[in-house]
Amino acid sequence: MPTPSMEDYIEQIYNLIDKKGYARVSDIAEALMVHPSSVTKMIQKLDKDEYVVYEKYRGFVLTEKGKKVGERLVFRHELLEEFLKIIGVENENIYEDVEGIEHHLSWNSIDRIGDLVKYFQTNEDRVEDLKQVQKMNRN
């Protein structure tokens, strides 16, 4: 099981590969606002734990294990963003809030939030009902 820090790197690598076809140390460092040397150390750790295959001076790629974890982490992130939108969190707060909570929830909690998101998405009236409750609570 990856640590929260490892999860951040795996998620970032997965996103970069998905968008650009590759992930470079400099891209990861910039995205995570860390030094390239920190990225290299983490890549070596991820290699040891079989999330990436790393060859010095040649780069790295996600393993199947790394891809599966990356996919799940991106799913978690997107699900939490959707959940926060549904419950009325202001857009400018969503990214920071997701970053703050995503590592602190169990996968069981994530799955239950997924159920709730589906519940709201299957009937727009439910979202409107929630908005009415929120409106009454503001008064």
Image: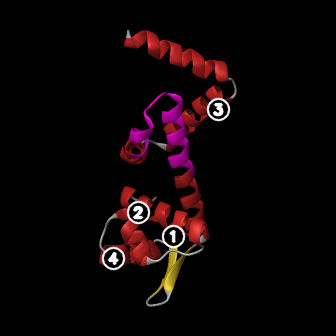
Mark 1, Cα crowd under 10 Å, few <14 / some 14-19 / many 20+, is many
Query: Could you tell me if the residues under marks 1 and 2 are in contact, i.e. CB atoms within 8 Å?
Result: yes
Q: Amino acid at mark 3?
A: Lys
Q: Nearer the viewer, residue 129 or 1?
A: 129
Residue at 38%, 9% in the rendered image:
139
User: Who comes first in sequence, dot 4 or dot 2?
Assistant: 2
Question: Is residue 12 placed above or below 136 in the rendered structure?
Answer: below
Q: Which residues are magenta?
A: 75-95
Where's residue 58, x and y in %?
49, 89
The secondary element bearing badge 1 is classed as loop
Depth order, front residue of 64/87? 87
Q: Which residue is mark 4?
A: 36
According to the picture, the residue beneath numbered tag 1 turns out to be 51
Q: Is residue 89 magenta?
A: yes
First in sequence: mark 4 vs mark 3: 4
Indicate which label's residue lies in the foreground, 4 or 2: 4
**Three-letter code for the amino acid on which mark 4 is drawn:** Pro
Q: Residues within 10 Å of mark 4 (few under 14, many from 20)?
A: some
Q: Which residue is mark 3?
A: 118
Say which of marks 2 and 3 sits in front: 3
